[in-house]
Image: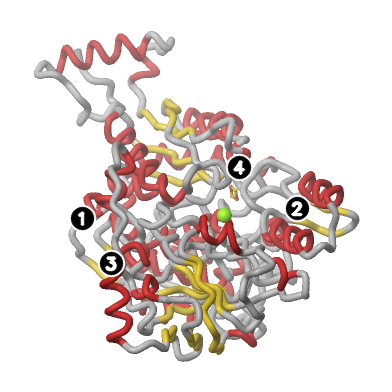
Amino acid sequence: MPEGKGLRRNVAHYGDAEFAAYLRKAFIKAMGYTDEALERPVIGIVDTGSGFNACHRNMPDLIEAASRGVMLAGAIPVPFPVISLQESFAHPSTMYLRNLMAMDAEEMIRAQPMDAVILIGGCDKTVPALLMGAASADIPAIMLVTGPMMAGSWRGERLGACTDCRRFWGRFRAGELDAGQIAEVSDNLAPTIGTCGVMGTASTMALAVEAMGMMLPGGACAPAVSSERRRIAELTGTRAVEIAREGLKPSDIMTVPAFENAFRTVMAAGGSTNAIIHLTAMAGRLGIKVSLETVDRISRETPVLVDLKPSGRGYMEDLHRAGGLTPILHALRGLMKTDALTITGRTLGDNIDAAPPAWPQDVVRGTDDPVVAGESMVVLGGNLAPGGALLKTAAASPALLKHRGRAVVFDSLADMAERIDSPDLDVNPDDILVLKNAGPIGAPGMPEAGYIPIPKKLAQQGVKDMVRISDARMSGTAFGTIVLHITPEAAAGGPLQAVRSGDIIALDAAARSLLLEVAPEEIAFRLAQTQPCEKALYGYARLYRQSIRQADEGCDFDFCIPPVRDCL
Ligand code: FES
Ligand code: MG
């Protein structure tokens, strides 16, 4: 019995290909398909909906709309599940599980017979995970995001998850809001389904992926609850059928110039530091090595143009009204690699030409009038971060970008939780808060703990920002003078492990340096004294511990990364 014309041929069989096809057809026909339907191309649709994931709550609608688009183009849509990750509901962190989701996506795309796949994600880790998996499987694939939530309001003030979550929590900790007021705020922080409404990781990745060319033009910003989001889903379904016929694969699109466009978009957006890790991991799946020097160079060249929180003022609904990615691309055109191929089958330059012209608006600025004139983030080196560290200067206090102070050290997340609010904590506003053992191995899973809270007694005195350093990550929605991703991390024997309370640390963002003012012999002596804590691990925890790479390599698993064949 012949395989359906549309069905991929590289699917499992057990020695007798005809028997396997006959059996497979019998089972798929149990779903009620006719032979005529099964003659058509099959478009897989990744379903990452979950009762724990409000960011993906519109998944049924998007699958319906994408399926309609697939059928309008003459193919058959087949949804299938992949792990869902929501930032607030994944212990110990979503980063710990991102690679598991990537492996799930990769193997399910590879295992099941489909001619192309529509990847539907949205919440922070889901977009990179799906694209990492799709890049490794490398069959025609197109990204669709669930879209951002709308902004809320509390007593006349606009709110958006989760920059304002932190701002109001800071006010609550400082005693400016009472329990009843903070409860009212929490009713309004996430007033609709969809991804966080500021320039957090989800929004940053959506823009970066549109700029990279793996999403239809205009696909990044339409709100989750809008009719436009559903129309984008329908168009994505139709385009998925065309890329199946054209054989347009992730490896054709996710090239060095495409990644450069993605990184540049992150910088212009004042985007999340997490995007640096995710884009590095995605590039790694294609054999592209991203150097932190290049990231720093792109950042230096690119002013922050998008006036959204946490670097600026607005919310994603404002960026959508301003035209989404389009005005950013118009402003950046001279800096972009316009020859990069995109999912439309045309180049980025062609897509920009076909896009509506920019109209008057006050969310996306011109390069002559940026939100932040300097760079969005800097890559630090120095003896405390020999493998690099990141500081999002756009969300930092300018006065603290060059600062020398006394270290107040927390050895772990538990230690920090226990002591940070103690009235006995020996801490002054000029000190530098240091958190260790919160990196990829340490926590494990590199949680977003880099946003170390201001110790309560200082918060109550009105202290809003301090220099804080760690091997952790930070939510893209957070702000402050916060050094992140210190590499190698403390748990991997990095110099961060040697820092003791009372040591002097010097940060100089302009000089790209983070220095521990302790003699090299003393640092080596202290590190030699540290006993690595080895405990027996089983299952995924063991796989993770054995295989996780550091932040500068995207925190991917070593066995998922093919040999380097290109560099950015
Ligand atoms: Fe899902 Fe913020 S929690 S995007
Ligand atoms: Mg986030």
Q: Say few, some or many: other residues with alpha carbon within 10 Å of mark 2 (under 14 / 14 to 19 / 20 or more).
A: many
- Element assignment for label 4: helix
Horizontal arrangement in the rendering, residue 258 relative to residue 398 (left or right): left
- Give the residue type at disc 2: Ala
- Give the residue type at disc 1: Pro
- Give the residue type at disc 4: Cys
Which residue carries the number 2 mark?
Answer: 151
**Label 1 vs label 4: CA separation?**
32 Å
Q: Which residue is pictured at 90% across the width and 55% down the height?
A: 155
Establish whether ligand 1 lies closer than 8 Å to the Cβ of label 4.
Answer: yes
Closer to us: 554 or 401: 401
Residue 443, picture quadrant: bottom left
Q: Earlier in the sequence, mark 3 or mark 2?
A: 2
Closer to us: 425 or 198: 425
The image's mark for residue 55 is: 4
Closer to us: 449 or 9: 449
Which residue carries the number 1 mark?
Answer: 562
**Label 4 vs label 3: CA separation?**
31 Å
Disc 1 and disc 4 in contact, CB within 8 angstroms: no
Q: Which residue is pictured at 32% across the width and 40% down the height?
A: 540
**Label 4 vs label 2: CA separation?**
14 Å
The image's mark for residue 289 is: 3
Q: Earlier in the sequence, mark 1 or mark 4?
A: 4
Percent x, y for residue 134? 34, 45
- Element assignment for label 3: strand
Q: Earlier in the sequence, mark 3 or mark 1?
A: 3
Q: Say few, some or many: other residues with alpha carbon within 10 Å of mark 3 (under 14 / 14 to 19 / 20 or more).
A: many
Disc 3 and disc 1 in contact, CB within 8 angstroms: no
- Element assignment for label 2: loop
